[in-house]
Amino acid sequence: MNIGRPPAVALFAATALAIGLTVGFGLGLWLLLARVWGVGLFGASWLVLVQVHGILQLFGFAGLFAMGIALHALPRFRGAEAPSRWLVWITYLMTVAGLGIRSIAQAVPDLPGRGPLLLVGSALLLLGMVAFAAAALRALTGGRNPHRADELVIGAGVALFPVAALFVALEAGSPTLIVDQATDDRALWTMLLGAIGTLIFGAWARLAPGFVAAVPAKPRLLVAGVVLWLLGVAGLASRTPAGPWLLLAGLTITTYALNVFGPGIARQPLQDHARLTRIGVRSAFGWAFVGVGILAAGTVGVAGSYLQVSAGRHALALGFVTLMIYSVAARALPAFLARRLWSPRLQAATLIVANLSVALRVFPQLVEGAEFDAVVGLSGILAYTGLVLFTVNVVRTLRGPGAVAPARGAPVHLDLDLRKR
């Protein structure tokens, strides 16, 4: 298989969707229904599968999407050569193999050689993340284009991918099936907010003017906001009370620097696909504020139970990160692959269903009443439905005709039946 045809980004995206439909969103839906509706787990440990789900969702679904887009886009941002094919293959194969081995080893207590397999899976995942960081940082530091502040932000996010994988590797020494929650949180927050969240900020700073005619980002404010954001991630990962508040301050400054909710510079109404992208991004940032706000409230005793922390985590994972993937990928993938998005209407339905699923997941958990269990269960079904809609749109886009017009002078086939004239 030639990884250049189709581009590697298509392989990464397809694998991310496959993971999301099965052991990502699929496993998450099963676990949610098991908790609120009593669906059976066939003897498996709910807590163990929750931890497995978290790793697969972040490193598999969101991580592969982010890495695929970064490896494709960063050389073009910088005017640099495409990353080494070997580094791309190592990134992909080691990440997928590491996730598979580690997840099976953690979930199956009687698996022969379980301990060594946990170490092997974690080591492979770390190797995949290191290969990605090497390829991405090489593109960012090379090239002929002038350097920009958003590249510094992207580089900070990229550098945290192997750090998050290292924290996962440190979990492999746990003698029990269930990893200590503080240890698991350190890895998940570093990946969710440190690596992926920071990469989102930098990528959107670069893409927003072209995608939605946004005012270019304010470089100094962007860097200052991201520095505060990263300090907040470190505080959250180490369970420092100031962590969520630093996150909130960093998110506020970064959002202002990116002009997410401000007016654009377009002199005429945006086209449908651009309006959908702007709606999706604004809703994603809105959920980021909800999630960080819930976590900050927990530091002053307003919200601090497991379900309320879960509400904050899901506002950030399902609301912020997933909606950004839906919004940006639906615009970027067609552009990368010279395609048109198959169905803007399906994209609109995806955003509606996804936002509704986050609302039904987050707000009932803040109340913590058993009477809301049915609503929470419905949120899982809607979240999975949103992924299915997005997958259909992406697959049909990837398999559709090219959007590039024939070059001047190239023959264009006309299917005319002159006998009817």
Image (cartoon, rainbow, N blue to C red):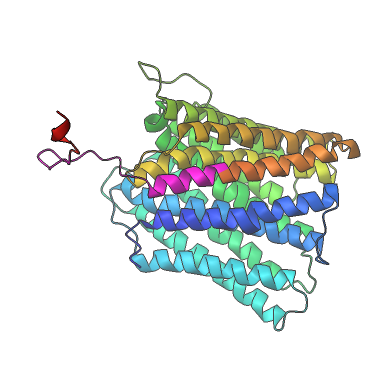
Choose between 27 and 270: the one closer to the eye: 27
Choose between 380 and 125: the one closer to the eye: 380
Indicate the quadrant where residue 320 lies: top right
Q: In the current view of this chain or complex, which residue is farthest to the bottom?
A: 112
Residue 392 included in the magenta stretch of the image? yes
In the image, residue 212 above or below residue 45: above
In the image, residue 118 above or below residue 407: below
Choose between 384 and 247: the one closer to the eye: 384
Task: For residue 160, say whether it is visible.
Answer: no
Choose between 261 and 23: the one closer to the eye: 23
Q: In the current view of this chain or complex, which residue is farthest to the right?
A: 370
Indicate the quadrant where residue 316 lies: top right
Estimate the x, y position of residue 186 in percent, counting from the top left: 69, 56
* Span colored in magenta: 389-413
In the image, residue 16 above or below residue 225: below
* Quadrant position of the N terminus in the picture: bottom left
Residue 2 included in the magenta stretch of the image? no
Task: For residue 248, say whether it is visible.
Answer: yes
Estimate the x, y position of residue 191 in percent, counting from the top left: 60, 53
Q: In the current view of this chain or complex, which residue is farthest to the front?
A: 419
Q: In the current view of this chain or complex, which residue is farthest to the left?
A: 409
Rendered residue at 33%/51% (across/down): 75
- Relative to 118, is 278 on the left or the right? left
Q: How many marks?
A: 0
